[in-house]
Amino acid sequence: MDAASKPTDLRINAERLWASLMEMAKIGATPKGGVRRLTLTDLDRQSRDLFVAWCKAAGLTVSVDGVGSIFARRAGRKDALPPVVSGSHLDTQPSGGRFDGCFGVMAALEVARTLNDRGIQTEAPFEIAMWTNEEGSRFLPVMGASGAFAGVHTTEEILAGRDVDGTAFGDALRAIGYAGTAPVGGRRLGAYFEAHIEQGPILENTGNTIGVVTGALGQRWFEVTVTGMDAHAGPTPMHLRRDALLGASYLIQEVNRLGSATEHSRGTVGMIVNRPNSRNVVPGETVFSVDFRDTDVSGLDRMEQGLRAAAERFAAEHKLGLAIRQTIFFPPCHFDQSCVTAVRAAAEGLGYPHMDIVSGAGHDAVYIARVAPTAMIFVPCEGGISHNEIENAKPEDLAAGCNVLLQAVLAKAGASSFL
Ligand SMILES: [Zn+2]
């Protein structure tokens, strides 16, 4: 290796990364410039076929596990070492964008291609991971395959999931030819890195190119049912009403107030069902969702207690029935210190403006973090908009994120030819 080939001089091929992203975005392209590529559909098969063809062309060894996740392996000098893995997902939301998930998979592929170009052999093997059904929009649970890899779900649970038409996950997986034979999880990874668009506005607003992701917010979701009494809007005097929607509106304000209390807390009501939902009837029942997020369990506890206390107060004041049921709990996730440090050092060394950031969204990395040292790399997306056809990101930011990924992978996998 000549002096110009030192790892810090290594750069990924930005044009090739962009071209791969744009080629993949054609599969399921929507008229508004987005992508609709639901998991385990024929479009998903096409994206997998293309990805696998690219991996094979790069000389990688491809395997598929029992829930359809794809692993493409580049041998290491010490091939028995646990692999350093990087990836994300190729499925999208029904009206998704070109970068959510796909960037992480294409970035990992670009890392492998760059190592090939420069003839670099890492000590530990390097693997690209493509996790099945991250989005959870066709089948539940969300992040199902990475969750199964981490032992959160059994393979049987994942395969038994059904979509709204009653099709089983396992049958859909077989139909697209990706019911693999590799065991689901149960093996050691040296490290896992996932590059992803931020899906929020913080990097753009602060003028940073790289988000060094230190963890992910914990989430606690509830379904709140407020019960009052249906009554005629004319003859029923105000003071005799038991208006469920009025009670819900108080609580929705309270959720917003609780979520606004600290920098790292969030409180959202995104779904509401009002019954009988008639113009001249005092509502008798209102059901709504509550989504609390925080970096710490104590923050989630604080918001839950606040919600329950407010609910008790309003219920007594307005003679309403109130039931609060927890539907989802993801504990806050703190990524591995040494992996986070590798990402930060890479951003630093490459001279990219960067900041520490906490992911507000769930990602495959959050599950993999339970079984392997893990970190994530965020790049800005335009206006912070994601899960939307207009989702956009700048080629130079994506290239920067991929360069950081390359350096972080080299730091963890080791490249003895440079040492
Ligand atoms: Zn994603």
Image: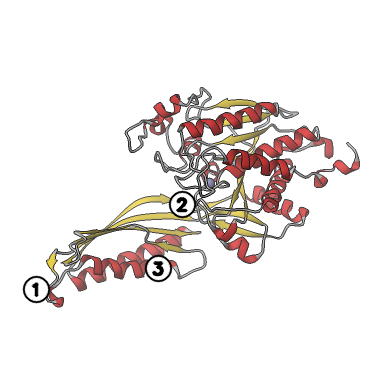
Residue at horizontal 49 percent and vertical 69 percent from the top: 262
Of the residues shown, which amino acid type is indicated by label 2? Pro
Asked if residue 185 shows in the view, the reply is no
> Where residue 384 sits: x, y (%)?
55, 59
Q: Disc 1 beta carbon < 8 A from ligand 1?
A: no
Of badges 3 and 1, the one in the foreground is: 1
| Residue that mark 1 sits on | 235
| Residue that mark 3 sits on | 256
Q: Quadrant of the C terminus?
A: top right
Of the residues shown, which amino acid type is indicated by label 3? Asn
Confirm or deny contact between disc 2 and disc 3 (CB under 8 A).
no
Residue at horizontal 71 percent and vertical 51 percent from the top: 400
**In this rendering, position of residue 96 left or right of residue 305:** right
- Disc with the residue nearer the chain's start (3 vs 1): 1
Work out which residue is located at the far left of the displayed protein and give it.
Answer: 235
Work out which residue is located at the far top of the displayed protein and give it.
Answer: 181
| Residue that mark 2 sits on | 331
> Where residue 110 sits: x, y (%)?
69, 39
Of the residues shown, which amino acid type is indicated by label 1? Pro
Residue at horizontal 70 percent and vertical 48 percent from the top: 399
**Element marked by disc 1:** loop
**Element marked by disc 2:** loop
